[in-house]
Image (spheres, rainbow, N blue to C red):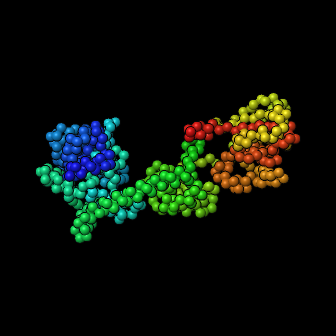
Amino acid sequence: MINRVIRYIREYHMIDEGDCVVAGVSGGADSVCLFIMLLEISKVIPMEIRVVHVNHLIRSDAAADAMYVEQLCRANGIAFTLVEEDVEALAGTLRLSTEEAGRNVRYAAFYRELGDRKGRIAIAHNKNDSCETFLFHLFRGTALKGLTGIPPVRDKVIRPLLCLERSEIEAFLQGRGIRYCIDSTNLEDNYSRNIIRHHILAAAVKEISPAAINHISNACGRVSEAYDLIEDITRQGYHACVRVTTENGNITKYHIDREPFFLLHATIQGYVVMEVLSDAAGGRRNLEAVHVGQVCGLMNRQCGKEVMLPYNLCAKRDYMGVCIYRATEKLPQETALHEVMVPQEMVTAPGTGERIEIILNSHQKISATFVTNTDIGADMQNIPQNKYTKWIDYDKIKDSIVIRTRRQGDYLTVNAMNQRKTLKKYFIDHKIPQEERGRTWLVADGSHVVWVVGQRISSHYKISENTTRILCLTFEDEEQQAGECAGH
């Protein structure tokens, strides 16, 4: 049986030579077997073994278990650490179940013991535990991941005994004459897992198939393999249709683009949405299939519709698809910011090449320069095509250039015949999200929009061979540039 465990460890690359292995040993059959196995395996794979025992202070006889484990470690020259924590009181304070609070305390103790050492944390889960987890999730309702059982390796946690059934473990200890402690709470039916263990799984083995545990375990393995494939496809789908942006330094928005999203299989769509929600929330504890369905449903609703989700998340339909962000992170309002006039001295002395910087806010500015047609030549091919740099025929300016955000009555011309289109209609046609419209800078001549900054200029103000004065404008955004540099 030791060789089976060694093969299992090597199959999943659990332990490397020279590792420090912190073992959680409660004193029960499983953990004592794990302890003995690690001692035997250390003869083949040299390692440092350290034991942590956690007393939850629930049972009156728990101190005897701690003493037994300490004696076991002392007899074999293994480092022993005892952690005592009032788990029931902690569960009440944190509003957790006793089981969950106990688990948190144990894993925190294991990770503290491992510290910065190179190695792993060994837990004594066996094949029966994995089957019980499978059935527990199945009965309570779960996605596919919940049917994968208990993984052999997760981060630094390893489970070398998952290849063994509980009956094999007890027979191994009996054959070696090794005693172990019996946790009286494991004999009660106060917990759902104990009911599954004592009644459901036991009945399946006795009445349906003696190999039921092995069959369920094998099914968990096949589901796990299928889930690994789904996870890989989900990652590809995520990269294909999800964009993440940060606004105003702290507002993280997750954009799910509708067109590539609908190219995904319906199952993968759900997994992609769950990944987006968990990323936006920082966890997935309270996220369920109903929330995924709400987000998917938004894809076929009109722009502006939104739903509220756990963790104060807001999912909002926009022109590109659905945008998800924390509702507590207030988005900037659609109000005019401030107006900046182009200095008149530049207009009265064109062609000097003097550069004026017009500061819009802490990280955005527009640089302006006046030149004449003769300075650049009559070749219209010289006109820059950069969306953040535009040349404007200043001879056609009626009032004075103002840089501002949108106002009621704004319009621009969209073709050589100078046909008008309202700015609102332009935003709608070009699928500019509502929350961005009030923050978009405009270079305006009264109500006539000369340039929607970062996009097009009005046809009326395009330069021609008859132009004499040219206003050259360049928009700069330090935050955007920093983000692009970080991306590269």
Q: Quadrant of residue 256?
A: bottom right
**Residue sticking out furthest to the bottom:** 207
Is any atom of residue 279 visible in this view?
A: yes
Pick the front one: 98 or 68: 68
Left or right side of 8 for 279: right
Identified at 82% across, 54% down, the residue is 419
Identified at 82% across, 32% down, the residue is 375
Pick the front one: 373 or 413: 373
Identified at 28% across, 39% down, the residue is 17
**Residue sticking out furthest to the right:** 466
Classify the position of the C terminus by image quarter.
top right
Q: Position of residue 181 (x, y in %)?
A: 17, 51
Pick the front one: 268 or 76: 268
Q: Position of residue 339 (x, y in %)?
A: 73, 40
Identified at 59% across, 40% down, the residue is 484
Q: Is residue 34 above or below residue 198?
A: above
